[in-house]
Amino acid sequence: MSAVIGSSGPPPPGSDPANRSIATISRIASNYQIRTSTLSQNTAKLSSPILLQRTVAYDVGTNPPRSSGNNNLHQNMADKNGRRRRSSSILQVYHEPLEPIEQLSDQSALPNLNANWVNAKGAWAIHLVLIVCLKVLYDVIPGVSQETSWTLTNISYMFGSYIMFHHVRGVPFEFNGGAYDNLNMWEQIDDGAQYTPAKKFLLSVPIALFLLSTHYTHYDLVYFTINFLAVLAVVIPKLPFSHRMRVGLFSGVPED
């Protein structure tokens, strides 16, 4: 303290030593305040770019403040992960959602001619007629054995049944305004009810044909495997757990 006071110059004549000490302390305090303010300004200038990069976004009224930079980073990573999952998926299994009220109203407005015919007279007998016609057609082909004829009959009926009842969706008519565009014929029969008389008959026909084909092929392992795979492709989509189930190969779940 004496060195600082001595450097300030000789005291004026007639001044009190206590007053000189107070004046010296005041000058030191003012110099310290000036240096402190200058240092604060320099620090603010240096840190301003960092503060600008770490901006904070606020959602008014509801959500707490969150860092916009971190939020965008997490969102971009989630989008990339989602795209990778969709692109890397080979088999997609999902269920068709229920129709909205407007579409249900369109379905109940008019009878569904695409599916109601299965309950009409002679609709059940046509399946037996088709099976007999297929068997006769393959029998008249030269060089076709009975085992091959029964196997071809079984495969032909199963293939046609799958295309008709499970593959094609919608109604080939314009009167209902596309009310059944997301349902196949099996799901349209009896308004989707399970184990109705018509559905029981349509389920029993391929099973009976498989048993006949297995018997007349003398339980050969090759023919049995072919006929068994064919009947599985038709029976599984008819079971209740497969109702509205969709299987996509190398394709994602549709957005609509």
Image: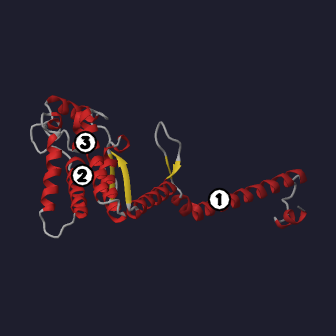
**Residue highlighted by disc 3:** 202
Element on which disc 1 rests: helix
Q: CA distance from mark 2 to mark 1?
A: 80 Å
Which quadrant would residue 185 be assigned to in this image? top left
Amino acid under label 1?
Ser
Q: Which class describes the residues within 10 Å of circle 1: few (<14), some (14-19), or many (20+)?
A: few
Callout 3: SS: helix
Q: Toward the viewer: 171 or 156? A: 156
User: What is the three-letter code of the residue carrying label 2?
Assistant: Tyr
In front of the other: 206 or 105: 206
Instruction: Rate crowding at label 2 as few (under 14), some (14 to 19) or many (20 or more) other CA atoms within 10 Å.
Output: some
Q: Indicate left or right for 182 with 112 as reference.
A: right
Which mark identifies residue 162?
2
Secondary structure found at label 2: helix
Residue toward you, 44 or 241? 241
The residue pinned by badge 1 equals 40
Q: Are marks 1 and 3 in contact (CB under 8 Å)?
A: no
Report the side of 140 relative to 238 (left or right). Answer: left
Precedes in sequence: disc 3 or disc 2: 2
Q: Is residue 210 above or below residue 190?
A: below
Front of the two marks 1 and 3: 3
The answer to whether one can see residue 256 in this image is no
First along the sequence among labels 1 and 3: 1
Quarter holding residue 219: bottom left
Look at 22% across and 61% down and name the residue there. Answer: 152
Q: Is residue 201 above or below residue 82?
A: above
Q: How many marks?
A: 3
- The residue at 37%/49% (across/down) is 94
Going by the numbered disc 3, the residue's amino acid type is Leu
Name which of mark 2 and mark 1 comes first in the sequence: 1
Residue found at the very far left of the displayed protein: 174
The percent coordinates of residue 238 (x first, y second) are 31, 44
